[in-house]
Image (spheres, coloured by chain):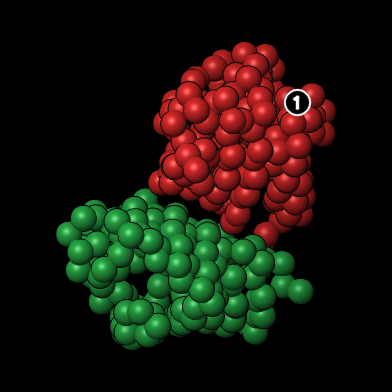
Amino acid sequence: MNVDAHLAISALKARYCRTLDTQDWTGFGDCFTEDVHFDLSVEGGVTHGRDAVVALVSQAMIGAKSAHHVHSPEISVDGDAAEAIWAMQDRVIWPAERAKLVGHGSFTGYGHYREQYVRRNNQWRIARLVLSRLIVERFPA
Amino acid sequence: MTDQAFLEAYVAISAEMARYCLTLDSKDWNGFADRFTDDVDFDMSFSGGGKFNNRAEAMAMVESSLTGAITAHQVHTPDIELNGDAAEVIWAMQDRVVFAPDRAKTIGFAGLTGYGHYRQSWVRQGGRWRISKHMLTRLHVDMQPLA
């Protein structure tokens, strides 16, 4: 087991969740490679490139509150490349205008992040992220 | 290269935080208190609670506010920065609290599910890691209406 890479990738994913939920968009962008493949096709389509991802997510989260948690990663490392599957849970509360648009006030979701990482200049970043869902519970505003 | 000192601290602090959740949720108040230094800076002011500069007062507050309640605390994905016998740690956290019936009536809610971050300082004294600063910030709290 590659303990260094395991810990570094876990810290990267902790930072992904924290910067997303505290809306630190510079920090969030730094979690990804410039050419990241970001696939929320279950709910938001496929996006290519760090700038486009930050634009998409920061726009979607205006006025929203969120809490993303990730657990029990299955990580495999091959040199400067790695893959992981994370169990995830998220709670998202939409602002009033968006709640009207999407037809619910908030949701609690469960699923998996399937990710690939690359290490460049001793820094691991997410090169590919695919979200799949097990359950999404939607609640009225 | 991650050094051995970091790995040992990472595992030890993670185990201490597991005991934090276990002792808190099982109301083992002596065990819970033992997670903290005597002069812990215990700050729940960002999450609707008090701020204390010693362990005895902080523990009295926690114990009295959870009398008769059922709690389940989870912590995930620690971000740990180690500096010798000190460490700065941020945990993603989630808690579920079912209030005691009397308290639920007073507050007007049956319970809550909360999300946030524990922001902590740890110190190693006599080979044991303890929490010297403990702050909870909230992302969101879902209040559960009375049935």
Task: Work out whether residue B48 or residue B120 is closer to the camera in this orientation and state it.
Answer: B48
Task: Work out whether residue B83 or residue B29 is closer to the camera in this orientation and state it.
Answer: B29
Q: Is residue A72 above or below residue B135?
A: below
Q: Name, please, the residue furthest toward the right.
A: B126
Which quadrant of the view contains residue B54? top right
Instruction: Please state the horizontal and vertical placement of residue B111, each as a whole percent of the image.
Output: 52, 39
Crowdedness of circle 1 by 10 Å Cα count: few (<14), some, many (20+)? some
Q: What quarter of the picture does the N terminus of chain B occupy?
A: bottom right
Q: Is residue A72 left or right of residue A33?
A: right
- Indicate the amino acid at tag 1: Trp
Which quadrant of the view contains residue A10? bottom right
Question: Can residue A41 be seen at all in this image of the molecule?
Answer: yes
Name the element at disc 1. Answer: helix
Which quadrant of the view contains residue B25? top right
Which residue shows up at 35% across the image and 79% down it? A43
Q: Which chain is red?
A: B
Instruction: Please state the horizontal and vertical placement of residue B125, each as a whole percent of the image.
Output: 76, 28
Task: Work out whether residue A2 or residue B28 is closer to the camera in this orientation and state it.
Answer: B28
Tell me, what hue is chain A? green
- Which residue position is annotated with label 1? B29
Which residue shows up at 82% across the image and 34% down it? B127
Instruction: Please state the horizontal and vertical placement of residue A75, each as a whole percent of the image.
Output: 65, 76
